[in-house]
Amino acid sequence: MTTMRPSGLWELVEWRAAASPDAEMAVDEHGRRLTFGEYRAAAERAAAGLAAGAADGGGPGRIAAVSWQLPTRIESLVLVAALARLGVVQNPILPIYRDREVGFIAGQARPAMLVVPPAWRGYDHAAMAHRIAGATPGVGVLVVDGALPEGDPATLPPPARPGGAPPVRWLFYTSGTTADPKGALHTDAALMATAAGMAERLDMTAGDRNALVFPFTHIGGIVWLFAGLLHGFAQILAETFDPRATTDVLRREGVTTAGAGTPFHLAYLAAQRENPGDRLFPSLRVCPGGGAPKPPRLHLDVKRELGGAGVASGWGLTECPILSMASVRDPDRALAGTEGRAMPGVDLRVVTPDGRVAGPGEEGELRARAPQMMAGYADASLDGRAFDADGYFRTGDLGTIDEHGYVTVTGRLKDVIVRKGENISATEVEGLLYEHPGVRDVAVVGLPDPALGEVCCAVLVPEAGREPPSLRELSAWLGERGLMIQKHPERLELVEALPRNPAGKILKNDLRSRFG
């Protein structure tokens, strides 16, 4: 076995299977388990089965891409490795996508195969896939009801060992809600760099057991697969996150890294508070986060009540995942209020509205050059607008970088509320409202107003067992913390839960449509 780090995913699967074949690679909520050695063998059988299907007309052996939309299951992990063994481009699709999004993706990516479950969570994915295939020439459908197709690995050709520049192996689509999703092209090398940097910040070892409880088809799910293979730790899978049932599974399986973002961490805290005298996750080291802003108090609550290092969150995009990330060794101030420092090899800068590179602590658009940067968009016409003249990717996120290199994301360029000519950062207001003891979750959005242009509306999930705070009470709270009166919410809406996408980001367009 080579001691050099593999350059591609299939090489990584082989390398890990040789290094620790009997170590547990994955376990699901039903107690099904898979070792790294078994993972490699299952992937080769599946690759042979898929290749045999290609010989019968329409499988991945003849293609540019395979699109797949499976839940977070052991079979999904095996499929990824099988497609890597075949050397094809794979296109994971979020399970919440329906005809419009999947149809658009199929029309642009032109996969030879669309892999779906028969039905999942009450939706008939197979029927959707056949509708899309019928309207998109050349697209075949594989319905996976449990096991993947299998064949004899001896029939497979030797694995491809490409030389030169890393080839594109991945096509991930952004989870936008107002326009067609954008497809980002990635290499194994880019995802490997992301996984290695993340694992270093979290001090991951072979003894860890990670909570993979969000959609595996998200780019973050694939990054965690790479990280587990690099370091030999196990993934605890949950097909659907249920605050009570999933928490029980994580406890049963001795979770050490309990991700994967604010809504998950809030659920863990709620479960812990139901049994304050009983440590929920005795082996917990850290709660990794990302994908959505976190209330500043969340880290301290998690550290005090759940234990471990608290919340170590990161920031990135589908186009360039995890550009910055906190370390388990960072001070509480940084863990509570920032997204950590730039990942290894990442060059970040803040650019002010007038095009000047900002100084420490000065707000502007965060831009990046990084080894985990996408190779471009599937629609190459989008590339020119995505990068500035110096080759930095325009993230569209507003933020600051302090004198110690810590990144704070303050909002989105498109998420600034303009009230009577005054710019209001929704993230700034949300951060202060999160600290109110009567607030469990909150989003701040701008709503149209004929006199002011926009008004600031706080959409709030009250803390259980407490009287919901009034608008007057929230305004007094914000005033005591020094927020200028023009930035105070002028409208309050109470809801049971905020709408979020699978990455945990709040769907603010849904809130604007509902309350606007």
Image (cartoon, rainbow, N blue to C red):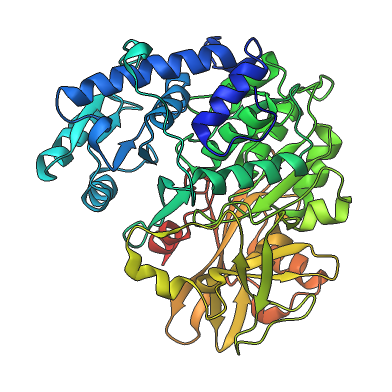
Where's residue 240, x and y in %? 48, 27
Q: Based on the displayed image, in which of its 4 quarters is residue 208 positioned?
A: top right
- Where is 507 relative to 455, above or below? above
Answer whether residue 443 is visible to the viewer in this image.
yes
Where's residue 451, x and y in %? 47, 87
Q: Going by the image, does 198 lie left or right of 376?
A: right
Q: Going by the image, does 481 lie left or right of 371?
A: right
Which residue corresponds to the image point at 69% horizontal and 57% vertical from the top-left?
345
Q: 53 or 157: nearer the eye?
A: 157
Which residue corresponds to the image point at 42% horizontal and 28% vertical from the top-left?
159
- Where is 208 relative to 98, above or below? above
Q: 425 or 86: nearer the eye?
A: 86
- Where is 202 relative to 159, above or below? below
Work out which quarter of the rendered image holds the C terminus and state it.
Answer: bottom left
Q: 288 or 351: nearer the eye?
A: 351
Which residue corresponds to the image point at 38% horizontal and 34% vertical from the top-left?
87
Q: Based on the displayed image, in which of its 4 quarters is residue 146 positioned?
A: top left
Where's residue 161, x and y in %? 46, 36
Work out which quarter of the rendered image holds the N terminus and state it.
Answer: top right
Answer whether residue 456 is visible to the viewer in this image.
no
Q: Going by the image, does 135 lie left or right of 149?
A: left
Which residue corresponds to the image point at 34% horizontal and 19% vertical from the top-left?
156
Q: 262 or 74: nearer the eye?
A: 74
Q: Based on the displayed image, in which of its 4 quarters is residue 346 positioned?
A: bottom right
Q: Residue furthest front?
A: 163
